[in-house]
Image (spheres, coloured by chain):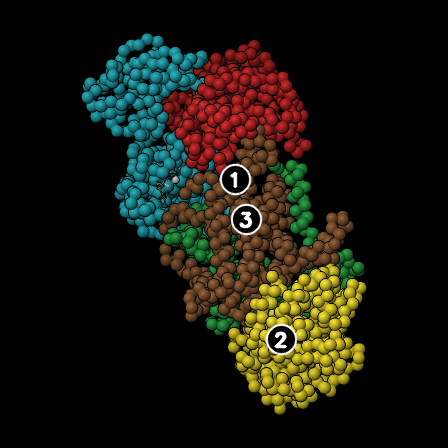
Chain colours: A yellow, B brown, C red, D green, E cyan
């Protein structure tokens, strides 16, 4: 592949990638362009919400997408619906650098985790000072916080947190305790948000003083509201992977494998970990980040504290939880 | 605008009648295949239920959350119509009574926001309505309120956004109706002793009834079915039917449910428009000259 | 029932051109006065200022000696009949007519009796419950009249109330208006651009030209003694002979070219002679005075008469002649201008 | 009298007019803010956000495809709509007003439902490429404008003009192109503009009809707004307003010139 | 330049009501024939069928003996002047007039010379580069005429070409049409509902009533010898005396009520007597025959004469009288119907 001149494209083939709509500019410059340069594979992209894109490929076998990057919950659903091609992990040179747990998840779902996020609390230190999840239930936060909506990536994590507050694990009582805790939380909640940029605006306009948020959004929030502080409570957090998979109907499997391997490579994992890049925490264990580089990422200590969510359980109960959530939180 | 304008073939023309078929069929087939067929396709599964054909709908309506979304959608639409009408009437009157060239400039000015991207228009209100936004700053400065009001991401902000979205449509429609009125009718009322206010309510408004209802129906239908405004200014806590359709369909992948809501939305908006049109006819006391 | 006086009324819409140029006139109690003039001469403007629908630039409007110039229109208590009727389309005939009474706060029973009475007079009783759009033009016209009359106006203003009607209906309506005006002894100002209409209906006629009053007199006087060429032309004097002072021979005689003309009017300050087409006679021999030789250059059959255009040394003349057979183009004939029909004008 | 000279009316109207214009003015102002969030008052002046527009691949690609789709859909709507209008207004079509309502019916279906239903039927069932589906969706959006506006002007156009054409030896087809089309040019331009702008600004249909390398501008802006709360959105809004203003100007000019000779 | 023959032409729009009922007539070379009739009588329908714009239900149209009934409109080579002018708004005057020649594939130079010639004739040369909207009504009218003339039509059809003009212009235009028609020796069919217009311009007049031809004759004959009451009423005979056969005395005498009337026409098959308002004379004493006593019930000044409505034992009569002074309502007078003006009609 290396013999090709930059101009010709016929040799490397092409691949159609479906990925998140966040930071499309950095995705283009830090991942896709270098990928094409190195492999000579041309990339077409579709940007959008994880769940929307999952819905589309689920209903439309002819979507033309080869590789898809999804949030963990959607990857689990996709796997369950058998939308993904069975992966031959031997074709991925960088797969061996993933942790055992990650490798297991990859084999379970035929989708490879390429980054992970976790949640914490972001707050305006001029107004409040927060350290622990339980503080979110304080009466003096009435009408001052925002939490992720059930339908978003961290919606289930929010439910887990509520379960922890009620001291009954979600998986043990089908969320009964968690919903009770949410009902208690409701007076404090201004908004259940779907887009983390909503938070930027709400902090900016003083609508909220604190929010439960995924770490990937922290950089963006602090850029627009430099005062904001982010904390991952010592009691622990919940992690969520973003996975990449090849679609069953893909006609460009070779190029697709190349892309995934590229995505897992040390060079790229390190690059996109940058705060000005995609701010993606690395999964490649070869990547080492300094403390400042590790800021706002699920890495090191935080990664150790991070608990996982049983999306196989969650997705089975999602429909009824959404309905309950809507009745309690959005009514 | 929704009303089909009256077609009148004045005199029979000696022309190949077959030509009509060739001219109409392409557009007819297009609308048939791409509007009616898809609607039928999404409607059919919603009636295929083991229990009864309506059980999907019954289940949908038994969920109080859904009923709340429906009533919110309806309430927002009605409120928007009323506000748009109250704001639109005076300015329409004012524009319609300007000299021709001034009227043209004003009409263009009104048209401009109407032709501006909906994202842009709604987004502007985020800047204004936020807790720290222009409006709150203004109110606080004037000591109208002591604490900033939470307007953004509420039903109120959706209504404000919708009003902004549809006010130009109402004005454009009303200016048209008012321009058609015979100004001498109002002069006659004045000569007969009617003050301007009396003339407004007893002479102008009654004559405008059909125009007002046409405008109202446009605004109502537009607000009922609008997606972008509630999406940007409402957020998920304040879903309306169209944002609920999208959420069900694409975020949650529940197409059956999305179809049910879609059908309910079409029925509700069609029914409301039909009722409004009936009311309009009842109120318009002028005999129709068929 | 009132006396109207207009003093030095002037109006400019744009601040520059004066559409009305200081006109003054008065209308007596119970008089019907027509304002006659070509399109754009200021008829409607005058009427609208009197009604209070338009601000004057300067001047005064007095009703029974009281200045009403600053009274708002809805307090003037005038009646007005609009060219387009201006009926309220959403009200039925009864309600249309009752509107003015309602505005005056009359009781329901009073309104009912008054409206019914005027509907009776105008022959509209059976249409009380109909809407304007269900009535014919003439019936709408009468509603408009009834609506103006029922409030017992001091003054009734009518702006070309008949101009939308076809010839037959127009004739009938103008008779009706005259009859009602005389019966109810109203003071009426009636705008029209139809010469015949205005002569048929008025006590006095005001002829306007470019914002001025050219002549204000009884129909007969205007018809037989037009004051200016403009008025003459307007009322059907189609033939004019211009001359200058040098050509005046004596009080009643003028010599133009080689021909002497005798006129019924004094010629001392005159500049023009005029005569109607139907008053010129085609005679067999040239008797000299008041007679001129000409050639027919076009002919037209008018039903009862023929109309010819005739070329002479003093220009073209139009002549109407009642005769069984049409004269042919090219025929040479003598035209006689009888002195009793030949008028002399000074403007 | 309730005319333009009535003071209360004038004041109320000016307030409403201000309300209509103010938000757009604010958008313009925020687009120059040096702060990286959309807020007022602005702290400094910069063109950076305008520069940033051109670094967003979605915006560039979105603009191109939105432009293409709007042009194609408007063109198709005219191509299908004008003949139908001609038949309905000039030929003896039975139940002409029924047909007209039929052609206007897409207006009555919520756009989000059109998107949703079309996606299922056209993209999934019929396996028509998403791009074609998008064009179809936007075509349905446009057709009612064409029907409404051109019907109005066909009804106004003196039908004797066509008859005069025939009398003077012009065949019906030729008459249409030589005499009818030039005389409804104004409303064709107006219809085209309404179609173009509504298609170009549409979100609900495009939300469903998207796919690889098929990003439309409005959803891209919406997406950007939801992920990054910086004045880039203000900046692109300003560019779009200029774009709209330019179109209005051109149309006004085109139709204005025409109305001089008419 | 051609001879038109219409044979048993019938038309029904809805398959039931016959709007034209088997009408037949012919127009000679170089003749100008007017079709006169009230609104809705079928004038336009007739013209449109002849033009080929409308399908006939039955019947034939022949031009110079050749049947053109099935010839499509754009091959007929007729000229047509539409009531609304129907000028092409997007073409200038030159192009408007040139249109028909272009369709006939003439060369540019030929077109130029022909168009310029006709523009010269119609006095439009200076407007060649203007657009229709920039012309006055009368000028547009002439363009419409020029456009029709330039193709040298076998037959020129005109549908109320003057109905949109004001009285003055209308008069001028009708003279112009007549002049051009005679100069170019055209065969013209001219539709109008204006009686005077049609008399002034035509060689022959066809009076239509409800899809039939009531009378087809020269203007003079129609004017002096209307065949039916309908025609008479249409051309200004406003007074009618109805009677039945029993009342006929002899060939020229009829007795209605107590009064004997002598008529210029034969009365044997007659049913109605008719006379024009201006032919009734007001006389001092009742001479018996042809005279009746009446009371004035309304009076009106017409400028040159007065018009009265008079109530008599035989109904109301309308009378026009030239006189200096107006007679008053209520005055009793004797009306004389001179035998030479009293016509007897059988229908
Ligand atoms: N609102 C206006 N603004 C400016 N000029 C006006 C206005 N209304 C009328 N004029 C001008 O004033 C003059 C007199 O107009 P007015 O309407 O009084 O004429 P009129 O005698 O009633 O004519 P018509 O017989 O055509 O009704 C005309 O030259 C007209 O153009
Ligand atoms: N397209 C049509 N369908 C049905 N009836 C029609 C049609 N066109 C005309 N008619 C009817 O045919 C009759 C004759 O119409 P036509 O237009 O020939 O009248 P006209 O003599 O030209 O009247 P006008 O003086 O009003 O123009 C009328 O009763 C009219 O209502
Ligand atoms: N199809 C539903 C009608 C909604 C009206 N849309 C208005 C869009 C303005 N850009
Ligand atoms: Mg006037
Ligand atoms: Mg006709």
Q: Tell me the residue that label 3 is attached to.
A: B215
In the image, what residue occupies the spot 60% across and 45% down?
Answer: B86
- Circle 2 chain: A
Between residues A102 and C118, which one lies in front from this camera angle? A102
Which of the marked residues, 3 or 1, is nearer the chain's N terminus?
A: 1
Q: Residues within 10 Å of mark 1 (few under 14, many from 20)?
A: many
Disc marking residue A90: none
Q: Do circles 3 and 1 both sit on a common chain?
A: yes
Query: Where does residue D23 sit, x and y in percent of width and height?
Result: 68, 54
Look at mark 1 in the image and give the residue it sits on: B207
Q: Helix or strand or loop: what does disc 2 sit on?
A: helix
Q: Which residue is mark 2?
A: A170
**Chain at numbered mark 1:** B
**Quick one: SS at disc 1?**
helix
Q: Residue A197 location in percent, x, y? A: 69, 66
Q: Is residue A290 above or below residue C57?
A: below
- x, y (%) of residue C291? 47, 16
Instruction: Work out whether E237 lies above or below A243.
Output: above
Secondary structure under tag 3 reads helix
Nearer the viewer's eye, disc 3 or disc 2? 2
On the image, the x and y values in percent for residue D125 come to 47, 72
Q: Is residue E264 above or below residue A265?
A: above
- Chain of residue at mark 3: B
Q: Whole-Å distance between the Cαs marked 3 and 1?
A: 14 Å
- Between the residue at mark 1 and the residue at mark 2, the CA separation in whole angstroms equals 64 Å
Question: Would residue D128 be found to the left or right of residue D50 on screen?
Answer: left
Q: Quadrant of the N terminus of chain C?
A: top right
Report whether A94 appears left or right of B37.
Answer: right
Q: Residue at the location (49% across, 52% down)?
A: B273
Of the residues tagged 1 and 2, which is closer to the observer?
2
- Separation of residues labelled 3 and 2 (CA atoms): 52 Å
């Amino acid at each position: 592949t290396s013999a090709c001149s930059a101009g010709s494209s016929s040799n490397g083939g092409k691949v159609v990638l479906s990925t998140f709509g966040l930071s499309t500019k950095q995705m283009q410059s830090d991942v896709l362009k270098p990928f094409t340069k190195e492999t000579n594979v041309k990339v077409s992209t579709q940007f959008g919400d994880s769940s929307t894109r999952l819905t589309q490929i689920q209903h439309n076998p002819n979507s033309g997408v080869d590789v898809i990057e999804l949030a963990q919950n959607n990857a689990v659903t996709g796997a369950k619906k058998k939308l993904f091609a069975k992966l031959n992990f031997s074709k991925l040179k960088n797969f061996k650098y993933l942790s055992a747990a990650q490798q297991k998840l990859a084999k379970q779902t035929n989708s490879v985790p390429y980054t992970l996020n976790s949640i914490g609390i972001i707050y305006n230190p001029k107004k409040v000072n927060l350290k622990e999840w339980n503080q979110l239930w304080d009466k003096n936060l009435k009408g001052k916080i925002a939490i992720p909506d059930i339908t978003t990536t961290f919606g289930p994590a929010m439910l887990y947190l509520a379960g922890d507050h009620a001291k009954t694990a979600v998986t043990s009582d089908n969320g009964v305790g968690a919903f009770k805790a949410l009902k208690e939380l409701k007076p404090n909640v201004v908004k259940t948000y779907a887009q983390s940029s909503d938070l930027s605006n709400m902090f900016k306009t003083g609508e909220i003083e604190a929010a439960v948020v995924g770490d990937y959004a922290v950089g963006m929030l602090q850029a627009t509201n430099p005062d904001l502080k982010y904390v991952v409570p010592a009691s622990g957090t919940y992690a969520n992977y973003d996975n990449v998979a090849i679609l069953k109907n893909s006609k460009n499997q070779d190029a697709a494998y190349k892309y995934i391997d590229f995505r897992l490579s040390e060079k790229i994992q390190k690059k996109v970990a940058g705060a000005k890049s995609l701010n993606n925490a690395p999964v490649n264990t070869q990547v080492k980040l300094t403390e400042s580089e590790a800021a706002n990422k699920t890495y090191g200590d935080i990664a150790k504290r991070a608990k996982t969510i049983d999306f196989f359980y969650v997705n089975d109960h999602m429909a009824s939880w959404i309905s309950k959530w809507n009745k309690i939180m959005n009514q | 605008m929704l009303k089909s304008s009256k077609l009148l073939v004045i005199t029979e023309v000696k022309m190949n009648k077959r030509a009509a078929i060739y001219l109409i069929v392409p557009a007819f087939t297009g609308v048939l295949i791409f509007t009616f067929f898809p609607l039928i396709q999404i409607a059919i599964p919603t009636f295929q239920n083991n229990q009864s054909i309506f059980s999907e709908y019954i289940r949908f309506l038994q969920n109080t959350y859904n009923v709340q979304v429906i009533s919110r959608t309806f309430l927002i639409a009605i409120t928007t119509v009323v506000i748009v009408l109250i704001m639109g009437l005076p300015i329409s009157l004012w524009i319609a009574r300007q000299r021709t060239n001034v009227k043209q400039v004003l009409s263009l000015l009104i048209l401009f926001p109407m032709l501006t991207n909906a994202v842009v228009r709604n987004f502007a209100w985020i800047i204004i309505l936020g807790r720290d936004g222009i409006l709150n700053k203004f109110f606080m400065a004037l000591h109208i309120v002591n604490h900033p009001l939470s307007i953004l991401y509420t039903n109120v902000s959706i209504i404000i956004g919708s009003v902004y979205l549809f006010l130009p449509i109402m004005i454009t429609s009303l200016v048209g109706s008012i321009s058609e009125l015979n100004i001498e009718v109002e002069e006659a009322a004045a000569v007969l002793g009617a003050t301007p206010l009396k003339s407004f309510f007893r002479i102008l408004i009654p004559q405008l009834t059909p125009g007002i209802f046409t405008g109202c129906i446009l605004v109502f239908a537009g607000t009922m079915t609008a997606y972008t405004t509630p999406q940007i200014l409402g957020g998920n806590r304040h879903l309306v039917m169209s944002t609920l359709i999208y959420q069900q369909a694409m975020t949650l992948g529940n197409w059956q449910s999305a179809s049910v809501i879609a059908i309910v939305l079409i029925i509700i908006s069609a029914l409301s428009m039909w009722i409004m049109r009936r009311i309009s006819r009842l109120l318009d006391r002028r005999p129709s000259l068929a | 029932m009132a006396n109207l006086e207009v003093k030095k009324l002037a109006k400019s819409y744009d601040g520059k051109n004066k559409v009305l140029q200081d006109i003054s006139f008065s209308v007596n109690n119970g008089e019907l006065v027509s304002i006659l003039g070509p399109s754009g001469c200021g008829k409607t403007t005058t009427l609208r200022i009197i009604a209070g629908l338009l601000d004057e630039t300067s001047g005064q409007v007095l009703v029974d000696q009281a200045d009403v110039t600053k009274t708002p229109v809805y307090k003037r208590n005038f009646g007005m009949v609009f060219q387009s009727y201006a009926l309220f389309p959403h009200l039925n005939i009864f309600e249309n007519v009752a509107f003015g009474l309602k505005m005056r706060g009359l009781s329901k029973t009073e309104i009912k009796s008054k409206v019914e009475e005027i509907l009776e007079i105008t022959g509209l009783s059976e249409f009380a419950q109909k809407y304007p759009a269900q009535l014919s033009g003439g019936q709408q016209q009468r509603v408009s009249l009834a609506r103006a009359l029922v409030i017992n106006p001091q003054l009734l203003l009518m702006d070309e109330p008949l101009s939308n009607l076809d010839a037959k209906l127009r004739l009938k309506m103008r008779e009706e208006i005259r009859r009602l005006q005389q019966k109810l002894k109203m003071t009426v100002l009636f705008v029209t651009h139809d010469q015949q209409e205005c002569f048929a209906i008025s006590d006095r006629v005001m002829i306007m030209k470019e914002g001025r009053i050219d002549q204000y007199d009884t129909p007969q006087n205007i018809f037989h003694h037009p004051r200016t060429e403009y008025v003459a032309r307007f009322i059907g004097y189609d033939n004019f002979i211009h001359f200058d002072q040098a050509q005046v021979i004596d009080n009643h005689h003028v010599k133009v070219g080689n021909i002497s003309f005798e006129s019924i009017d004094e010629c001392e300050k005159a500049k023009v002679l005029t005569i109607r087409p139907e008053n010129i006679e085609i005679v067999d021999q040239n008797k000299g005075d008041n007679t001129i030789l000409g050639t027919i250059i076009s002919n037209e059959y008018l039903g009862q008469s023929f109309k010819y255009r005739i070329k002479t040394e003093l220009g073209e003349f139009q002549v109407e002649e009642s005769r069984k057979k049409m004269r042919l183009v090219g025929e040479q004939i003598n035209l006689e201008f009888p002195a009793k029909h030949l008028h002399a004008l000074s403007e | 009298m309730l005319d333009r000279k009535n003071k209360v009316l004038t004041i109320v109207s000016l307030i409403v007019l201000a309300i209509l214009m103010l938000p757009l003015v604010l958008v313009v102002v925020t687009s120059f803010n040096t702060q990286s969030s959309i807020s007022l008052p602005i702290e400094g002046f910069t063109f950076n956000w305008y520069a940033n527009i051109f670094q967003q691949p979605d915006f560039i690609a979105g603009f191109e495809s939105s432009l293409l789709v709007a042009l194609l859909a408007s063109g198709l709507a005219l191509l299908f709509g004008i003949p139908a209008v001609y038949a309905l207004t000039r030929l003896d079509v039975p139940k002409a007003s029924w047909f007209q309502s039929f052609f206007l019916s897409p207006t009555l279906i919520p756009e989000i439902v059109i998107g949703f239903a079309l996606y299922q039927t056209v993209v999934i069932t019929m396996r028509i490429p998403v791009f074609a589906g998008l064009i179809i969706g936007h075509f349905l959006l446009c057709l009612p404008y064409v029907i409404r506006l051109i019907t109005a002007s066909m009804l106004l156009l003196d039908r004797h003009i066509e008859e005069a054409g025939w009398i003077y030896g012009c065949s019906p087809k030729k008459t249409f192109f030589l005499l009818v089309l030039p005389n409804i040019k104004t409303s064709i331009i107006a219809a085209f503009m309404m179609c173009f702008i509504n298609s170009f600004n549409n979100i609900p249909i495009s939300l469903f009809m998207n796919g690889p390398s098929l990003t439309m501008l409005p959803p891209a802006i919406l997406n950007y707004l939801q992920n990054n709360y910086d004045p880039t959105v203000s900046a692109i809004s300003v560019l779009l307003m200029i774009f709209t203003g330019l179109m209005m100007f051109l149309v006004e000019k085109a139709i204005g010139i025409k109305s001089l000779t008419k």
